[in-house]
Structures are given as C-alpha cells and as structure tokens.
C-alpha cells in the first residue's frame, strides 16, 4: 500500500513540476497545492503516531524503572543478595538500557522529512508570495476595501471564513515595503498595530512594526509622524541602533525645515499630516474609471440607451444549423454593438475543455508594443492555454458553433484560448486589435488584424471579474455558459478604439473563460467593407 502511495505521489508531483511557480496567477493550478498540503498533513500525522508510540514505550520503561529503583535503592545489599536481582541488574545495564538508547535515537522523522523535501521543490516561491500579497492589495484598491475588512475576511459571496493573523498582516506590509510600495506598507503596518493593541497574540513585536512604519511614513513625506513613531520605537527598544540614527536624522531635517521657514520670514509651524495618505498615481490614465466600473459604479446604461437594447432569438442569418435551435441573444450595448448569447456551452463541454486546458496552462503574456516580443506583465494576471481541434472533438464542436453564431469563418481565426485567472486575476484596459503605431503583431499569421472577439464565460464569479469598457462606461458580468461578442474593427478595417476593454480583478471565485479571435482574411464576403473610414 505504501509503495502504491509513493508511486502515486511521484506521478502527482511530476504533473506539479510541469506547472511549477507563478501559482498565484491561476486558481486552477493553486488547487494542486491544496492536495499537496493535504498529503503533507497525512505524512505529519503518521510521524506523530510513530513518535507517540515511541514515547509511550519510553514512558512505560521509565515508570517500570522508577518503581524498581525506588525498591532497590532503599536496601541495595539486601536487594542484590538475591542472585536473580543481581543478574537482572547486570543484564539491564548491559542490554536493556542500550536498547532503550537505540529506541530514543531512532529517527522516526526521516520519512516525513523525505516527503517534505520532495514536495518542497514544488512549493510556491518568494515570487508567488509577493504576487499573492500584491493581488490582495490590488483587490483592496480596486474594490475600496480597508485592511481591517480583508483581515476579517468579510468579502461578498464567500462560503468559507478566513482571517489574517497579526503575522499575516505583517507579511503583507513587509512585502509592500520590499517592493518600495510605502503607501500599502503604512496601511498594513497600521493594521498590525491595531490587532496587537486588541490583544492578539503574535510572534511579531510592536518594535518590528514601528521600525517599518516609521520609515514608510517618512518616505511618504510625513516627517512629524516619522519622528513620533521613531520615538515610540526607542521607548520600546532603547538599544535599537537604526532607530537611534533615524531619530537624529529626522530631528536634523525638521530643524533644517524650521530654519528655512525663519529665513523666509514665515512664522507658521510645520503642519503635521493626519496620517492619511493619497494612493500614488500610476501608469494607467483611466485607472479611476476602470476601477469604478469594476465596482459597478459609473455604468452609463441610461434609460434612453436601455430602450435601444433588445432580446431576440438568433439564427445566424438563417444558418441551417440554427433554424431549428436558435440561440437567445441579448443586446449588452448599442454602439459599438455588444451582444450576449445564452447556453452557448453546456456544463459537460465546459468541464471537458477545462480538463484538456489545465495541463497546458502557462502564464499569460502580452506583446511589447515596441519590440513585438511576447512577455509577462503585472497588468495581466492569469494563465492560458491554446487548444487545437485535434485535442478533443469538443474543441471542434465549440469552434463550429461560434462560426454558426457569428456568421464568420473560423478557418482564419486563432486557436481557442482558455484562460484561468489567479488571485486578484485581471487584464487591465487593452485593445484586442493591432494598432498602427505598433509592430504588426499578426503579420506572421498572414490573416490580417483581429476583426472580432467571441468571449465564452465558463464559470460564474461570486464577486468581481467583470469585463468593462472604460470609454463606453459599460460593465458585463460573467454568467456561466454565456458568451459575449463584439467587432474590434469598423467595416472600413480601421480599429474601433471604443472597444478598449479590461477583465476586472476577481474578488471572490474562480474565473474561467475561453475566447476566439476572428481575423480579417476570409471574412470579405461574410462582413463586407464599408465605404467610409467610420463605417
């Protein structure tokens, strides 16, 4: 039985080895870690049972020897006058006590340590821990959650209770600090102090927290508070060498500021900040709009626009295959026209596609607009795989169905891409089509630009994970088995810049999607060109 389990583990970790690292980018792959941890717990419990059995034998021996020695020590000569007692004493010291020594020295942890060593090579890395911490901070920012809410695990749609301990929160703050993210360092270190003040037990000390916090607020320009926190640190640990140096440095800077004010004939005192800091501006110009839409705020679905949206049965321009069983079609947006189709994929088809895709999942990449080279990026957190029709009949069946629905040919389309989003998984605002100012990303395909996108939702998402269009003010929420479709290019062949879209971070849940990108070639008579640039 043990041999069979060992062989099974070797096979299991062979699979894990294929997807090592970047676990945080795919919830689907993180599920493997659940089984790995479960196996470790079983191995640990086996070790504990062996240790308890060993300790029980040692205790029994100790009790037996205690009773015997208390009797023999009371009258040594009288005890040894019996030849059997004399023999047994010699035997015990020559044979039994060395046997006990061997028992004590037995390394019953060897099996557990061996198992742990094998599994450790497939454990998440420092990169994974940093990525997971960043994911929580991304959710914190996007959905306007304070650290206390996250620490208590009070998230919408959750089935399981999960809380962050003092040490967990400290790990969050330290990850932010190591990345030079002082804004989140302050938020999380303040949460650590709050939980410590509430009496929560932890290995993390207040002195450790104040060390990070004082320097972080200094980096945010709050000199007064940095000074105050450093003094608190020194009151807890007067011998803290770095804090002493920082105190003298902060005091000197404060004095220099006062001298500058006197030279400028200004009598006003340096106003201390209130301990509330602004989130730094980043590279994404539409950050506020994008995140508002992710929260369901700022959606521009006005009553007037809503009157132009309809539901209907769709037969794909009287496609024979859809005449008997048309698809339910719902308008999501009027211009550009975005539609949603219902019951596009069955649960069985979805599970089969996930099963085929999972072993092939790899960190999703983006094309560098300057070099044209595919690379990973922090603004796209997911894993994806590409499925060919030869992989399984279900792939060919789904491809053909998308052709019937859209009226476009799949002969020049890209392979079916399957994506699974990880912790806080997202894809920030982007275009699906290639713009004129970047290298022709699809030149090697010889099929032209991406004319349309067909996006299948293969899971429901408890919270977050919407597809949003910042320029439109539109938000589309995942519904398992449905699909959304839009054209990326105008009929003139020009890119429709209104279709810039994003996949919002997944707050709670596991998001699976698949998509098909249709290209221009082969669509000439299926979607004829317009006569002007804006058609």
Image (spheres, rainbow, N blue to C red):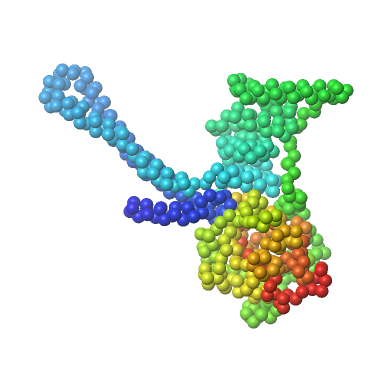
**With respect to residue 242, does 504 lie above or below?**
below
Q: Position of residue 121 (x, y in %)?
A: 46, 46
Image quadrant occupied by the C terminus: bottom right
333 left or right, relative to 199 = right
Of residues 127 and 138, which is closer to you in this image? 127
Residue 282: x and y in percent read 73, 45
On the picture, is 33 further left or further right than 182? left
Number of numbered tags placed on the structure image: 0
Location of residue 232 (image quadrant): top right
- Identified at 71% across, 52% down, the residue is 295
**Which residue is painted at 66% across and 38% down in the image?**
180
Q: Which residue is drawn at 64% across and 22% down?
A: 244
- What's the residue at 59%, 43% (across, down)? 130
Percent from the top left, x then y, of residue 218? 71, 31
Residue 380, visible in the rendered structure: yes
Quarter of the view holding residue 361: bottom right
Please say if 431 is above or below 189: below
Is 97 on the left or on the right of 355, as rendered? left
Residue 482 visible at all: no
Q: Quadrant of residue 328?
A: bottom right
**At which x and y percent is residue 390?**
52, 70
């Amino acid at each position: 039985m043990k041999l069979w389990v060992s062989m099974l583990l070797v096979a299991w970790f062979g699979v894990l080895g294929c997807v090592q690292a970047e676990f945080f980018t795919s919830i689907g792959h993180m599920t493997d870690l659940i089984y790995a941890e479960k196996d470790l717990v079983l191995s640990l419990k086996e070790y504990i049972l062996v240790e308890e059995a060993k300790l029980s034998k040692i205790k029994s021996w100790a009790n037996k020897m205690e009773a015997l020695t208390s009797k023999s020590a009371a009258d040594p000569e009288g005890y040894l006058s019996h030849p059997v007692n004399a023999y047994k004493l010699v035997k015990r010291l020559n044979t039994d006590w060395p046997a006990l020594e061997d028992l004590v020295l037995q390394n019953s942890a060897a099996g557990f340590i061996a198992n742990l060593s094998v599994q450790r090579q497939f454990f998440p890395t420092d990169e994974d821990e940093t990525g997971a911490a960043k994911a929580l901070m991304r959710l914190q920012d996007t959905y306007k959650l304070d650290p206390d809410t996250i620490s208590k695990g009070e998230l919408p749609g959750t089935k399981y209770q999960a809380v962050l301990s003092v040490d967990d929160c400290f790990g969050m703050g330290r990850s932010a600090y190591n990345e030079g993210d002082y804004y989140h360092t302050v938020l999380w270190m303040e949460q650590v102090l709050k939980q410590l003040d509430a009496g929560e037990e932890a290995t993390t000390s207040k002195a450790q927290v104040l060390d990070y916090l004082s320097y972080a607020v200094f980096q945010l320009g709050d000199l007064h508070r940095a000074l105050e926190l450093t003094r608190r640190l020194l009151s807890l640990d007067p011998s803290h060498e770095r804090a002493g140096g920082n105190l003298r440095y902060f005091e000197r800077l404060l004095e220099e500021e006062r001298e500058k004010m006197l030279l400028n004939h200004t009598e006003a005192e340096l106003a201390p900040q209130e301990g509330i800091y602004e989130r730094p501006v980043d590279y994404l110009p539409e950050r506020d709009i994008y995140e508002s839409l992710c929260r369901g705020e700022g959606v521009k679905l006005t009553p007037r626009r809503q009157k132009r949206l309809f539901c209907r049965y769709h037969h794909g321009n009287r496609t024979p295959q859809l005449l008997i069983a048309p698809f339910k079609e719902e308008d999501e947006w009027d211009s550009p026209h975005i539609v949603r189709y219902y019951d596009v994929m069955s649960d069985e088809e979805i599970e089969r596609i996930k099963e085929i895709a999972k072993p092939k999942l790899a960190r999703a990449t983006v094309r560098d607009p300057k070099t044209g080279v595919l690379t990973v990026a922090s603004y796209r957190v997911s894993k994806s795989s590409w499925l060919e029709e030869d992989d399984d009949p279900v792939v060919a069946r789904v491809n053909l169905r998308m052709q019937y629905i859209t009226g476009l040919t799949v002969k020049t389309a890209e392979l079916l891409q399957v994506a699974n989003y990880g912790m806080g998984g997202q894809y920030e605002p982007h275009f699906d089509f290639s713009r004129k100012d970047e290298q022709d990303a699809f030149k090697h395909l010889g099929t032209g630009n991406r004319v349309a996108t067909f996006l299948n939702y293969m899971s429901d998402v408890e919270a977050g994970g919407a597809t949003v269009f910042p320029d439109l003010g539109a938000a589309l929420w995942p519904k398992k088995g449905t699909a959304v479709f839009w054209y990326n290019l105008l009929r003139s062949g020009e890119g429709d810049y209104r279709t810039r879209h994003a996949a919002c971070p997944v707050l709670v849940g596991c998001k699976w999607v698949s998509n098909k990108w249709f290209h221009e070639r082969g669509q000439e008579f299926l979607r004829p060109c317009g006569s002007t640039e804006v058609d």
